[in-house]
Amino acid sequence: MTGRRGPKSPLRGLVTDIDGTLTDPNRRLSTEAVRLLRAIDSRGVHVVLATGNVLPVALAIHRSIGLTGPIVAENGGLVYRKVDGRDRVERLARRAPALAAFRSLRASGLPVRRLFTDRWRETEVAIEQPAPLRAIRAALRGTGVVAEATGYAIHLMERGMGKRAGLKAALGPLGLTLADCFVAGDGDNDVAMLRDAGFGASFPNGSPRARAAAKFVSRRPYADGFVEALMASGLVPRSGR
């Protein structure tokens, strides 16, 4: 579906990527997207940030927006939530296999370099773009580590991990599944959660795989498309802009 209003459904949760979804091309947060997220959260709809970024960055954005729901960081490797007023972090993946895989890639002569923010990463390794994704994936066959592209980096993680796995852990205690949620994302690492969503949304700037997995593809790109998709989902009335 492209640029058409989707059927209303009883969505009880909202899951969103950050970079390329709540931002403009320069990764600046959209004030309109922030306003709508605050309004949705204040109505009691569970809002979950699901990102490939590190938890300190995601938590700063979460608090600045004023959200109360959990965070899925590092592509599902970490789940943050408040429990009885205290910060709690659940680690779902090990970093050691990803580090070993990165060292092997470097030793093989592939031109790979870790992101600056990798110093705060706990469960995976993120490689700067551009990097030869096909060659990386070929080198990782049989290692138990996979490479996932986000459009901003290539992430090395344990096989079986990803945002969908992290969201299962984040949404379960809330009594939700992805089928209960509006889900927005733009990268290959968002494909699995978009496929399982009650209302999956992507944008013209999204990867071909993300757009194919979404139920709704906006006319406008980036955060403007996120706002458009929210209106189409029924989570926000058109008069709420």
Image (cartoon, helix red, strand yellow):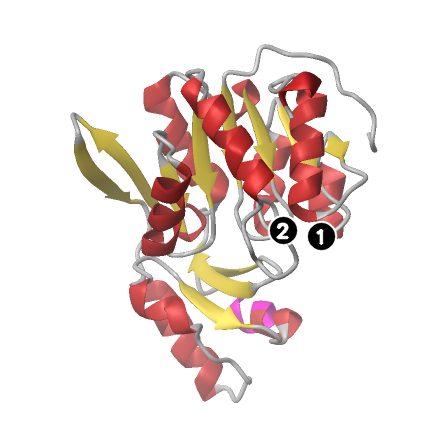
- Please state which of residues 239 and 118 is positioned toward the viewer in this rendering: 239
Magenta segment: 137-141
Q: Is residue 77 visible?
A: no
Alpha carbons under labels 2 and 1: distance apart = 5 Å
User: Residue 216's x, y, as percent?
Assistant: 74, 31
The residue positioned 71% from the left and 52% from the top of the image is 207
User: Residue 137's x, y, as percent?
Assistant: 58, 67
Identify the residue under disc 2.
Answer: 187
Q: What amino acid is at disc 1?
A: Ser
Comes first in the chain, label 2 or label 1: 2
Q: Is residue 32 visible?
A: yes
Quarter of the rendering occupied by the N terminus: top right
Identify the residue under disc 1.
Answer: 207
Dot 2 and dot 1 residues touching (CB under 8 Å) = yes
The part of the image, by quadrant, that contains residue 154 is bottom right
> Which label is found at residue 29?
none
- Please state which of residues 54 and 240 is positioned toward the viewer in this rendering: 240
The residue positioned 41% from the left and 53% from the top of the image is 74
Number of marks present in the image shown: 2
- Secondary structure under badge 1? loop
- Please state which of residues 65 and 89 is positioned toward the viewer in this rendering: 65
The residue positioned 42% from the left and 74% from the top of the image is 102
In this rendering, the answer to whether 38 lies above or below 91 is above
User: Residue 136's x, y, as percent?
Assistant: 57, 72
